[in-house]
Structure formats: structure tokens, C-alpha cells
Image (spheres, rainbow, N blue to C red):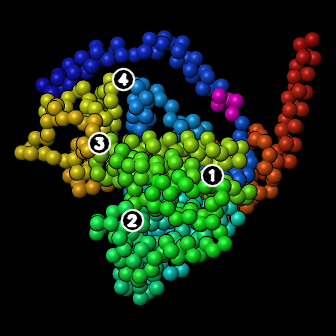
């Protein structure tokens, strides 16, 4: 009976869905022409083998392939399009690869282990940052001697300006890995450090923020980890949970300011002061807009907190004054946190905002000299299922009901807080609006927080040496590829040639331009001789 109902439902869907196509899409020539244009653009593509003066690295935390696809559809639907055919900024990147995300100790990783891989070039264990796999989670003694540095430090050591922009607290796993070494990603302030760790000489992440690397731009949240315990927050003075956390009495914001003597260093915590910062006259900027993580994009007060587009722009304008270039990490960190809550609406809107920030980054830089890389650190168990009609809301329900004769949403989770079964019956959502920001998607397995998932993630690149990001690679490869492209870190083989206009390379080897040019000339001469020979025979 269930099979018969399913077949009948599919028949009805096909009958109604067949008329939803746009007129031009019913014409075979439309698809052939589109494909030929795409083919020609690929054939006309020239490899950019310049040295990357700048690196823009965009990290979508938890932005797996399903999230990427669903966000594309949402972005189009927010523009009153059907959505599926929408071209995201990310979609325009010519080089695409996959990264394997497992950590040394777990099949499915967290943001700490993955960040250590793609920023420091070394795979490690769950929950540790900036240390190799010889370190053990929460055990300070194992951290000593196993520290690894990140590409942010490599770039700074090479004379470039560096910055971090995040929608989470600046002490969170992803941004923290760019500057800190910690046996626990949770040691945000000294109040989070166990007494044993203090005795063994470990320090908290916030204190390392102002000590380990001279970071030019720091933008995100995390005020409460920087100030003494009980310090009232300037924005939420009556909220005790927002007050300073530090037991050591240090005010790291004040210390940071004093360290910048002789430079123009600005600390801001609200949008008014942020807007007043002049990039042309500012050497250093620390902008902390919340006590902890920033608000979700759909909850953000535009009068108090800038968007990720605005923070990305400010960071680039400050950093790009350095004639030696810059490295900027931009993290869309709350994509992941929305997924943990089972709130696909929030996750997708965060991803759309993230894509808008990428567009701003491309607008402000030159592809000739700037390598832009976009990737996720890991995925989430988000499924895109059912048979929704073309153009149907990505946050809506599948028209094909389940065998229990109840509807389900197009987007669901493998596990999470959305599992709400009563007496063996799942919720009836026929009258529930699933398109609101607070709706929690149904999940198969009950969990307080959705876990991560372990499939490969996409890596997208454009600019100098973008082609070396193709293929399926270990996640730690990314740091080394970015470093090679920009001539920072240990492998300086790419620095032998001078930066010039993009040229066509016959191979992906690291040989000098002179050798390649000679081979190209020889190949061209051989081709001409072959043509002359053929013409002689035919005559």
C-alpha cells in the first residue's frame, strides 16, 4: 500500500511539476548554448602564475556542500528568482577542489583540528589548536614542544600586514588557531584554565592574542575574555554574564593599546566608532562588538554592529596600504553555530551574508595580485531531500509526504534538537510555518546539538596560482599551497620569477618561466613546420 501511495504521489508531482519550467528551458538550444558558452570560457582561461602579493582566505565554518547549494537557492529566492540557477560569488571561482577533513584521532573533526590543518599545515587531534597530534586535549604538559605556527605568522614574518575578521569571538577555534597554541580550544581566558595547566605554564588564548603575533586588524566578538572579572560591559552593563571574566586582573584591551606606542591604534566596540575609523590613517584596529560571539545576521542591530561585508571592507582597506601585501582570514563562523541549533534558516542566511563578503573582497582587490581562497572546515548532517518543485522555497516542505501521511521539510538533519516524537508519531507540521528564523528542522536522532559530518568540503580559488588548489587533497595541504603561492613560509620556490601579467602555462610544474617559454616556442615552431609539410604534400 505504501509503495502504491508513493508511486501515485510521484505521478501527481510529475503532472503538476512539468509546467513549472521557464519557456526558454523547454528549448534544447537554450541548454546547448549555455553549455557552449561555459565551455568556451574554460577554454579561454589563462593560468595566473604570479606571486600572490595578497591572500584573502574566506572560511565558512560548517559550510558543507549541502549548505552551499541551499544557500545558493536562498540567495536567488531572496532576489525573487526561482533560486536553483542563481550564481553565487563563490560559483565564479575557476579552480575547485575537495579537502579531506578527518582529524588524526577522529573520523569526523571539529573546528580546532581542522583550523590547525588548513592554517598551520599539520593535522592534529580534536579540540586542540596550533599544536600537532602529539598534544592531548586538555593536558598542558603535552603542548610543550609541539607548537606549530600558522600562515598568518608566516605572512607577518615576511613583512606583510595580517588580520582576522570573524562573526564569532576572536578567541574561538578558527581565528585562535591563526595566533595561539593551546591544548584546549576552550581556554578562552585565564578563568577557563585549570589550576594544573597554570602550574605547568600554559596561558589562555586571549592573552596570546596580543602576545604571539603582531596582528594589524582584529575584528569580531569576545570582549569579556579581555577584561578583569566583574568589569561591566559597555553595551550591556546590567548583564552579569557579559561582564569581564579574567581572574588575573589584566585588561588586555588597554595592554594592547599601550603596546602600539608610536602607531595609530584604535579600539572600538560599536558601529559609530567603527565607522569613524579612517583606514588611510589607521595602523592597527581592534574591534570587539559583543561580549561573546556576534549576533546572527538576521538578529544583528545594524545601528550597533556592522555586517561581515562592512568588517571585511574595513580590514582590507587598512591592510592593503602595506606595499608588501597582506593576509586576511575572514570567517563566517555562525553558519556552524546555527546548524548546531538545527536552525537551517539562520545557517543559510549566514552563508548568504558570507558570500556577499566574498563579493566585497573581490571588488576591493585585483585578481592579478590577490589569491582568494574559499572553503569550509567541515560539514553538518544537513540533508536536501524530497521532490520539491522548481523554485519552491528552500525552507519549505516537500510536496511528497511520507508513509505516515505527514509532510516533512526539504531540509532536515541527521541528528539534533529537532527530534520530537510523541508516542511513536512525529509532529504534524501541516500548519507550521517552517520559513521562520526560529524554526528547528526535524532530525532523525535526538541530540541537544547537531554534530558535524565527515564528508569532504569544497575548496574554491581564484587569482595567482589558483590552479594548485584543484583535485582531492588532505586539508593540511591548503596552508602549504597558499604559502607557496605567496612566497611565505618554508617553500619559497615560487619566488624565483618576478610578478608579471598572467601567462599560459603548459604544465603545472614549478619550472622557471624561461624554460617554459623556451618549450612553448619550440612547440610552436614544430607545429608550424608540420603545417608547412602537410601543405607541401597536398600541393
Cα–Cα span, label 1 and label 3: 33 Å
Left or right: 260 as drawn, with respect to 244:
right
- Give residue 468's position: percent from left, percent from top: 64, 48
Residue at figure coordinates x 53%, y 15% from the top left? 30
Q: Main secondary structure of the magenta part?
A: helix
Residue 448, label in figure:
none
- Give residue 222's position: percent from left, percent from top: 42, 65
| Residue designated by label 1 | 317
**First-in-chain label (3 vs 4):** 4
* Residue contact at pointers 1 and 3, CB within 8 angstroms: no
Cα–Cα span, label 1 and label 2: 27 Å
Q: Is residue 532 above or below residue 188?
A: above
In magenta, the rendered stretch is 41-45
Cα–Cα span, label 3 and label 4: 23 Å
* Residue contact at pointers 2 and 4, CB within 8 angstroms: no
Residue 234, label in figure:
2
- Give residue 180's position: percent from left, percent from top: 51, 71
Residue at figure coordinates x 46%, y 48% from the top left? 307
Residue at figure coordinates x 61%, y 22% from the top left? 37
**Residue nearest the observer in this picture, 263 or 501:** 263
Q: Secondary structure at mark 1?
A: helix
Q: Secondary structure at mark 4?
A: loop
Quarter of the figure with the C terminus: top right
Quarter of the figure with the N terminus: top left
**Residue nearest the observer in this picture, 139 or 310:** 310
| Residue designated by label 4 | 390
Residue found at the far bottom of this picture: 199
State whether residue 188 appears in this view.
no
Quadrant of the rendered structure where residue 521 is?
A: top right
Amino acid at each position: 500500500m505504501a509503495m502504491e501511495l508513493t508511486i501515485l504521489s510521484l505521478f501527481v508531482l510529475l503532472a503538476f511539476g512539468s509546467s513549472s519550467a521557464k519557456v526558454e528551458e523547454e528549448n534544447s538550444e537554450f541548454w546547448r548554448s549555455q553549455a557552449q558558452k561555459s565551455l568556451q570560457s574554460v577554454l579561454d582561461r589563462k593560468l595566473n602564475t604570479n606571486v600572490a602579493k595578497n591572500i584573502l582566505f574566506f572560511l565558512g565554518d560548517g559550510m558543507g556542500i549541502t549548505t552551499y547549494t541551499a544557500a545558493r537557492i536562498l540567495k536567488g529566492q531572496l532576489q525573487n528568482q526561482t533560486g536553483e540557477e542563481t550564481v553565487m560569488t563563490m560559483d565564479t571561482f575557476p579552480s575547485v577542489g575537495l579537502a579531506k577533513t578527518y582529524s588524526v584521532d577522529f573520523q569526523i573533526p571539529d573546528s580546532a583540528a581542522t583550523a590547525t590543518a588548513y592554517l598551520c599545515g599539520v593535522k592534529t587531534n580534536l579540540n586542540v589548536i596550533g599544536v600537532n597530534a602529539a598534544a592531548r586535549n586538555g593536558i598542558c604538559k603535552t603542548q610543550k614542544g609541539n607548537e606549530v605556527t600558522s600562515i598568518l605568522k608566516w605572512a607577518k614574518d615576511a613583512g606583510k600586514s595580517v588580520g582576522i575578521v570573524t562573526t564569532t569571538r576572536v578567541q574561538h577555534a578558527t581565528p585562535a588557531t591563526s595566533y595561539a597554541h593551546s591544548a584546549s580550544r576552550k581556554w578562552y581566558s585565564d578563568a577557563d584554565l585549570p589550576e594544573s595547566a597554570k602550574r605547568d605554564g600554559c596561558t589562555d588564548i586571549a592573552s596570546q592574542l596580543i602576545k604571539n603575533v603582531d596582528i594589524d586588524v582584529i575584528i569580531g566578538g569576545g570582549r569579556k575574555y579581555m577584561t578583569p572579572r566583574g568589569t561591566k560591559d559597555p553595551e550591556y552593563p546590567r548583564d552579569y554574564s557579559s561582564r569581564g571574566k579574567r581572574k588575573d586582573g589584566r585588561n588586555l584591551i588597554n595592554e594592547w593599546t599601550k603596546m602600539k606606542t608610536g602607531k595609530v591604534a584604535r579600539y572600538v566596540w560599536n558601529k559609530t566608532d567603527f565607522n569613524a575609523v579612517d583606514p588611510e590613517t589607521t595602523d592597527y584596529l581592534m574591534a570587539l562588538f559583543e561580549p561573546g560571539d556576534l549576533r546572527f545576521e538576521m538578529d544583528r542591530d545594524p545601528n550597533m554592529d556592522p555586517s561581515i561585508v562592512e568588517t571585511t571592507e574595513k580590514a582590507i582597506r587598512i591592510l592593503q596600504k602595506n606595499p608588501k601585501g597582506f593576509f586576511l582570514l575572514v570567517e563566517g563562523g555562525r553558519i556552524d553555530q546555527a546548524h548546531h541549533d538545527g536552525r537551517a534558516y539562520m545557517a543559510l542566511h549566514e552563508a548568504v551574508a558570507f558570500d556577499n563578503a566574498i563579493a566585497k573582497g573581490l571588488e576591493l582587490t585585483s585578481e592579478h595580485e590577490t589569491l582568494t581562497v574559499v572553503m569550509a572546515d567541515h560539514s553538518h548532517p544537513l540533508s536536501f531531500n524530497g521532490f520539491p518543485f522548481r523554485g519552491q522555497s528552500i525552507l519549505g516542505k516537500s510536496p511528497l509526504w511520507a508513509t505516515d501521511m505527514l509532510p516533512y521539510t526539504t531540509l532536515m538533519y541527521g541528528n539534533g534538537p529537532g527530534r520530537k516524537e510523541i508516542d511513536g508519531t512525529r509532529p504534524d507540521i501541516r500548519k507550521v510555518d517552517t520559513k521562520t528564523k526560529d524554526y528547528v528542522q526535524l532530525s532523525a536522532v535526538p541530540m541537544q546539538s547537531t554534530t558535524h559530518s565527515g564528508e569532504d568540503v569544497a575548496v574554491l580559488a581564484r587569482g595567482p596560482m589558483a590552479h594548485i588548489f584543484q583535485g582531492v587533497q588532505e586539508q593540511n595541504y591548503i596552508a602549504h599551497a597558499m604559502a607557496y603561492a605567496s612566497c611565505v613560509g618554508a617553500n619559497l620556490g615560487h619566488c624565483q620569477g618576478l610578478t608579471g601579467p598572467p601567462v599560459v602555462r603548459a604544465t603545472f610544474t614549478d619550472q622557471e618561466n624561461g624554460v617554459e617559454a623556451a618549450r612553448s616556442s619550440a612547440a610552436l615552431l614544430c607545429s608550424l613546420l608540420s603545417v608547412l609539410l602537410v601543405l607541401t604534400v597536398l600541393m
